[in-house]
Image (spheres, rainbow, N blue to C red):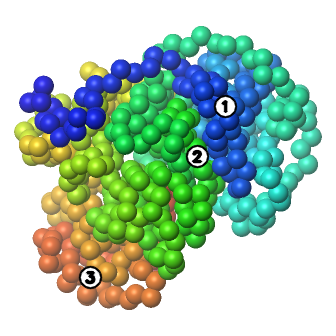
Amino acid sequence: MNEVKPWLKHYPKEIPESIEYDKKPLHDFLIENGLKYSEKKALHFQGKEFTFAEVLLEAKKTAHYLQKNGLKKGDRVASMLPNCPQAVITYYGTLMAGGIVVQVNPLYTERELEYQLKDSGATFIVCLDILLPRVNKVRNKTNLKHVIVSAIKDYLPFPKKIVYPFIQKRQYKMSVNVVETESTHIWRNMITNTTEDYKEVEINSTEDLALIQYTGGTTGYPKGVMLTHSNLVTNVNMATAWMYKIKENEEIVLGVLPFFHVYGMTTVMNLSIMFGAKMILIPQFNAAEILKTIEKLKPTLFPGAPTIYIGLLNHPDINKYDLSSIKACISGSAPLPLDVQNKFEEITGGKLVEGYGLTESSPVTHANLVWEKRINGSIGLPWPDTDAKIFDSETHTEVPVGKSGELVVKGPQIMKGYWNNQEATDKVLKDGWLYTGDIGYMTEDGFFYVIDRQDDMIIAGGYNIYPREVEEVLYEHDSIQEVAIVGVSDPYRGETVLASIVLKEGHEVTEKELNKHCRKSLAAYKVPRLYKFVEELPKTTVGKILKKDIIATHESQNKAVN
């Protein structure tokens, strides 16, 4: 077996090659832990804490209310919430009622919101009162029948200033006078006046959907990824097996990653509920607040993205805080620069390793070992019960070890397909393999590397250039905080390399100096021809750099000049 899967020889004895998974719905874990750990803390939000029993009770009430208002098994419930207690309660309450969750980014414009609601066919939505005007503008164009409106202050122990991007940097307050009607409901009334007598729904965990999670839409319209209860349960089981030193009901998970993104949903919310851990809900990333929170509340697990760790490391007061509670962090969403990994481990004393996954895989398929051998720059090894190969994209056959091609993966965490989009499903799911669209290779030892996405590859003068390789070289320069490499139009080479750079505070560097730095490590054709210094890079809410936005800005500016 090890000859077919060479990575298995690196597994320590504590990590099984295969796991016996729980064949039950995701929400059963909240029901069980609501009893097993009834008085243990499940959530911490802005100074207020909730026990597992309290979260379970309010999820049951939500399930009852949804059913009372007509929700049937398989109906979709949109959740347009930041990381707050309502987000957790809505998610699990929907599943208990037999519904399918549709996570909606609170930053969505009316156009984006309308598309996702129409495509999913959601009949319910739970949103903040501050977002109700946006929902109201599109509701008549969708299948929405009920809007449940909540306020952050519903769960605040005292009046407090809370800042979100979508509140435009002003103190949170009730933005609209919400009047309860047959189709508009007030969250507090729902929780106060509803019983917990919901009707249990029979769920087939391997067939029935728990979630329709929309992809970022970097190419065309976003697609709804159909994830079953089993997909989500197995991925958390894999995660806890991989981090085998963590202990049930003893961990504290820092919830900076948004739950409306599949990575935060799995590695923070679902892991915490299934593993009996307390999660700290952070509605928006702020480096100073995160540092204070770590010192005060002492989280042990900190899933994140490279931009989050970079933001903390570049805070001028980081050395004033005790961050030693951190045991383990798995970084995802983007490549993890080696320098960031080393510095973060040095400061915290914990382990920060790079992982890999996609929305279509619930999301994690690979990670470096946390406490054993790891290879810097590699995405690590496939998780238990996960198979991975490198295919030639045209022939769909495996390429020799060490040769690059498209990374394909297979396992129980792989999606059922795209919602109402069989054509797109058939393009990426073939014979049980998920074609990731990422270019990579596997070493003889079984470690995998991702060079870049197929879409991101730059072809300049006939040469293939993978942005990650150039980014890693630039990250080695002391003045660079963040960098994104993209290909932009060039009349002679077809494409040329543009480096969009954020400098560290107080640092200066010239294009000539960066050019000299790159030429020490890169072939001439890979060295950036254009450098652009910016205050910040455009990113998604989970910290993934929006390279297409960088290209679009450059092209429009270039067009204006010419």
Tell me the residue that label 1 is attached to.
38
Residue plotted at (56% across, 14% down): 203
Residue plotted at (66% across, 31% down): 38
Residue 370 placed where, x, y %?
31, 49
Distance (Cα) linking label 2 and label 1: 15 Å
Name the front one of labels 3 and 1: 1
Which SS class for mark 3?
A: helix
**Dot 3 crowding, Cα within 10 Å, few <14, some 14–19, many 20+:** some
Tell me the residue that label 3 is attached to.
514
The tag earlier along the polypeptide, 3 or 2, is 2
Residue plotted at (20% across, 77% down): 518
Tell me the residue that label 2 is attached to.
279
Distance (Cα) linking label 3 and label 1: 57 Å
Pick the residue in front: 175 or 53.
53
Residue 283 placed where, x, y %?
64, 54
Q: Mark 1 and mark 2 in contact (Cβ < 8 Å)?
A: no
Which SS class for mark 2?
A: strand
